[in-house]
Image: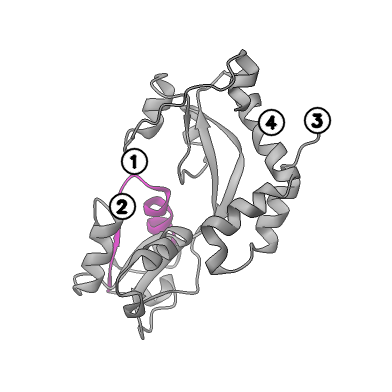
Amino acid sequence: MEVGKAVGLDPIKIQYVPVTLEGRFDTVASGAVDIECGTSTMTLARMRKVDFTYTTFLDGGSLLVKKGSAIAGIPALVDETVAVIPGTTSATSLRAALAKSYVNAKVVEVKTHEEGISALEAGKVTAYASDRVLLIGLLVKSSTPELFAIAPEQFSYEPYAFAVRRNDAGFRLVANTALARLYRSADVMTIFNRWFGSLGAPTPVLIGMYLMNATPE
């Protein structure tokens, strides 16, 4: 809606384009899509290829394990096997956390979240690593959520944001204007409750993020 107003086309036709984990930023950089609205972590390395909007969510990497498992975090993965999707910040952060803690664990690469949770359920791996909110989503959709638990430790910091083309300050401003207006209104809580309300209230850190990005007109 904000884009339509900015270019004088209100309403504007929105076309949704599927992207892959590996190619999502290339798709933005090439101009094939204008904005990537997924669970993408904003990093300095990725900023060499794309720009990012204001932060949209704060998360961290964690481990999905079987219920009753003694694994509470990275230090407990000694000589264990952990699955992760390659090319994600979770994969990079996982390997860094293992190295920092001097933990010798076997990292198994899987293509999808479903493959990761299936490997865990079948006992092929001891844990599946991903962003905590994604792990929660897997449990919500699972037919057997009672079989799993999420380890209490978070091994990374994951600030989500929308990816846009580099050096397109005008479009990034339009996107940030829409986000800032959302954060200044009660609508942001309506959206949060729609998708995450069953999991409880937003954390104080997330509320702080909304306030910091509620840039005035």
**Residue sticking out furthest to the front:** 11
Q: Which quadrant, please, contains the N terminus?
A: top right
Residue 9 on the magenta segment: no
Q: Are the two marked residues, 2 and 1, in contact with CB atoms closer than 8 angstroms?
A: yes
Residue 83 image point, x, y percent = 28, 62
* Amino acid type at image mark 4: Thr
For the residue labelled by badge 2, is the local secondary structure a helix, a strand or a loop? loop
Task: Say which mark, if any, is on residue 177.
Answer: 4
Crowd tier of the residue under label 1, counting other residues whose Cα lies within 10 Å: few below 14, some 14–19, many 20 or above: some
For the residue labelled by badge 1, is the local secondary structure a helix, a strand or a loop? loop
Task: Say which mark, if any, is on residue 85.
Answer: 2
**Residue sticking out furthest to the top:** 8
Of the image marks 2 and 4, the number of the one nearer the N terminus: 2
Q: Which residue corresponds to the image point at 19% horizontal and 70% vertical from the top-left?
A: 124
Q: Which residue corresponds to the image point at 28% horizontal and 65% vertical from the top-left?
A: 117
The one nearer the camera, 190 or 90, is: 190
Give the foreground label among 3 and 1: 3
| Distance from Cα at disc 3 to Cα at disc 2 | 40 Å
Residue corresponding to mark 1 = 21
Q: In this picture, is 31 found above or below 122?
A: above
Residue corresponding to mark 3 = 217
